[in-house]
Image (tube, coloured by chain):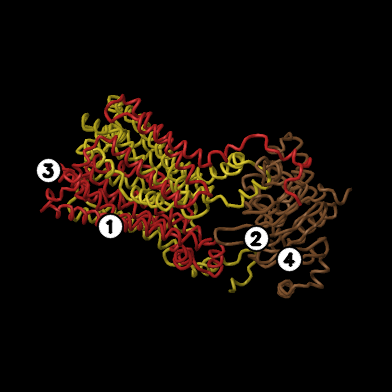
Amino acid sequence: MAISKSTGSTPSRLADVRARMEHIPLIRRHQFVFSFLAVLVAYGVFLLPGSGTPNFLGWVAVVAFVLLALAWAVIVFTDELKPEYLKTILVFVLLALGGWLYYRYSTGRWSEMTQLFFNVKIIKRALPILIQGFWTTVLMAVAAALMSTILGLLLAVFRSFGNPVLNLFIVAYVDFFRSMPIIVLMMVIYYALPFLNIRLSAIMSGIIALGLNSSAYVSEIFRAGFLSIKKGQFDAAHALGLTPMQTMRLVLLPQAIRVVLPPLVGNYVASAKDTALASAISIIELLKAGLSQKSLLANPSPLIFSAVLYLVMFVPLTRMAGLLERRMKAGVRQVRL
Amino acid sequence: MNPKAALPDAAQKFLRTHPAWFKLVRRPVFLAVTFALVAAYALLVLPQPGTASPAWLYSSIALFLLLVLAWSGNVLADKDKPEILKLAVSLLLIAVLGWLFYRYSGAQWGRLIEFFFNFKKLKGNWWILRDGLGVTLLLAVISAAGSVLVGLTVAVLRAYQSRTLDLFLKIYVDVFRSAPMVVIMVVLFFALPYVGISLGSILTTVVALSLGYGAYASESFRAGIEAVHSGQIEAARSLGLSRWQTIRMIILPQAIPVVIPPLTGNMVSMLKDTAVASLVAAPELLKRARELYTSKTNPTALVAAALIYLVVLIPLVRVVNVLEKRYNKGSQ
Amino acid sequence: MNGTSITDKMIEVVDLHKHFKDLHVLKGVNTSVTRSEVVAIMGPSGGGKSTFLRCLNRLEEPSSGHIFIEGVDIMAPYIDINKVRTEIGMVFQSFNLFPHLTALQNVKLAPIHVRRISAQEATERGMALLEKVGLKDKAHAYPEKLSGGQQQRVAIARALAMQPQIMFFDEPTSALDPEMIGEVLDVMRAMAREGMTMLVVSHEMGFIREAADRVLFLADGQIVEEGTPAQIFGDSKQVRTQDFLSKIL
């Protein structure tokens, strides 16, 4: 399109901009964005209820405001032409807005937040139990991992024999323990078995439940590992004169470990997370410690501390496990079933 | 040509220098002898139940198990042994394991029916379990929808590649994938009331499940989006489609089939995690079963609940397996 | 070189039979291979060619019959088959390189662990062999990064590293794209010229005509016909052979 008649070094930039803007959809145009913002500000100043807990209509107004603000934020965020620094500022503005809204409508318990959730004095008092809970969690995770690895390996080896009778049992076992929710399994072992005279301590029940469940997945992982080694590898190794022992050591094991390690680590991490379920059968692991101390000291700080501890433990572990899996296979990330 | 001619020089370098132990353990004589030894061990060495110290009991049983597994493994792994023998050995192995368990569990197996399958005690109360199942399924369905919503939104927003937004969303995903579901539920249910937010048990469960599994779902969706070849995106953009249009018409339709297997796996896991909601007082199956167990002092309700979970979940797990296999075949 | 002494007969096969459950795959094969001879084995698929080759180094256990390598009955209990295998190098249709090792490590593995030579010597030998097959610059590449033809050449170097007296090739070029077949056949031709005793199962007519001293036509588990390439391709006596040749020529 013609820009303008030549007036030297500055063609009509206005026409240029206008021409370009015709291709921009409505919601991206500066005018729209700023007018929307103005509407939001007006809404916030005039239409929002005053401080204190609002009534039902008030809640509706607040929720509508929040949704509108979010919509505006999404429009800005998803605009690739808007500069990055603007979006960063926007994030903090949104957070501040959220905090202000909360402060205004939550009957002013803001100053109490620290007292409630991050009360150092209370946490110090709860610390011994919390630490004990932490170590119990670690103990259970390690014991379950050991048990599941040994069991799973045995199951996978016996499955590799191809015997129909064994396969039936093993497949049934795997299906059973993959489908049973762990918490139900723990409760059955701890509460129901004593009626048959099988009395296991709470910790043993927890470890056994975790170990049994995990072993089903471990056996499938090992099985996949065995299957992943192509038959030709053995041919080549034997043709070179390697003994069966050497073949196992130099050819089979290195390959199998590479295939099996990432999903195995992922399984151990998931199993460790499941130790938190043991709180259901009164084992003083980390979660239960936090809960009981919260009740005892009438303050949720211990619980928050436990939760934060879980995050501190598992965010790095989960990332590491994910990294391992990604190095192994390109494809869809899968949740352990 | 006489095969038994005098050994030529070449034979020297081919001679076996170590005995073939491998061949030895496969010989029938060896197998018979070791079988007899293991049987003798079972009859003579294993202690009567309740007569030995725990240390001796556990170690002798462990050793016995080791021997039995090694012996049967040796037979079953041998390609040259006839199938019928291997079948017999496998049945024998199962029988021995069963016998071990029966002998040493000290359990009153005769009272199994009385305590685990005492349906008389449950008479008239089946509706409680049925209600619980209904709540379980309801929770699962609503949370499934919630998690898909959350996951899709997060994945699409992350596809826009705003660094800041991506960072915050990444934090969300990392936190909710790493935290155990029970911790999320418990914190939401027990800590939030202190700041005046008191969601009921059902709402807490739905929110917790949606947020938690939404994080997993978003990763699945992201992987699905990334699985769409970048050439497709380039072609779409060069045709003039906007980012939103590209996502809606090109990426999503191709990503969905890739995403179905992990997503359905997600949902089945979520169904299992509804049982955790019993800890935050949601009236789902496990909680109602526990109530019945307490009121009747008979664990039949728990066992019944466990069976119901199995009946519902095993087929679902199988279905997801099939889906996974189908997807893997298609992509390779 | 004494042409009739026993040790010149590198391989001697007497009445070899092989059963797979109910299937009688090899029905009495008799043949022999002398030093430096290049023998090609042809025939329809399922005829037993691969099975025959694999029986010779006992990758498959023969059901009955005798096999003599350098005059020694390799089925005898006092013989360590792994030692026999060090004298026979084998190259497979699907290469079978070890994926967790680089090309050089693949080549070095057996000399170090079976022949027990030092690592340094194995490295030197390995590099020399890789250079011989034209892959010196790929010594530290992993198999997944190599093309099919390159992988097969590494496989040949790996087999040669054991300094075998005999080389077996089980359809070495069947899994290769056409443009890579030539580089592998070149290596094989060079080996034949240097006097290696070779047994090659293949359909590559050009190579067989050029390099093979003898052709065995194996069908239905038996040697239907054998002779020089000229005899087999030009003037075959058996109907079966003519039938097969007409289909592939």
In the rendered structure, the residue with mark 1 lies on which chain? B
Foreground mark, 4 or 3?
A: 4
Q: Residues within 10 Å of mark 3 (few under 14, many from 20)?
A: few
- Residue B46 located left or right of residue A62: right
Chain-order first, disc 4 or disc 2: 2
Q: Which amino acid, mark 3?
A: Ser
Residue depicted at 26% across the width and 28% down the height: B50
Residue A214 figure quarter = top left
Chain-order first, disc 1 or disc 3: 1
Foreground mark, 1 or 3?
A: 3
Q: Are marks 2 and 3 in contact (CB under 8 Å)?
A: no
* Residue nearer the viewer, A159 or C107: A159
Q: Are marks 2 and 1 in contact (CB under 8 Å)?
A: no
Q: CA distance from mark 4 to mark 1?
A: 70 Å
SS state under label 1: helix
- Chain B takes which shade in the image? red
Q: CA distance from mark 2 to mark 1?
A: 65 Å
Q: Which amino acid, mark 4?
A: Phe
User: Which chain is drawn using brown?
Assistant: C
Q: Which residue is mark 4?
A: C217
Q: Are marks 4 and 2 in contact (CB under 8 Å)?
A: no
Foreground mark, 4 or 2?
A: 2
The x, y position of residue B325, in whole percent, is 45, 59
Q: Residues within 10 Å of mark 4 (few under 14, many from 20)?
A: many
- Residue B243 located left or right of residue B263: right
The x, y position of residue C34, in whole percent, is 81, 53
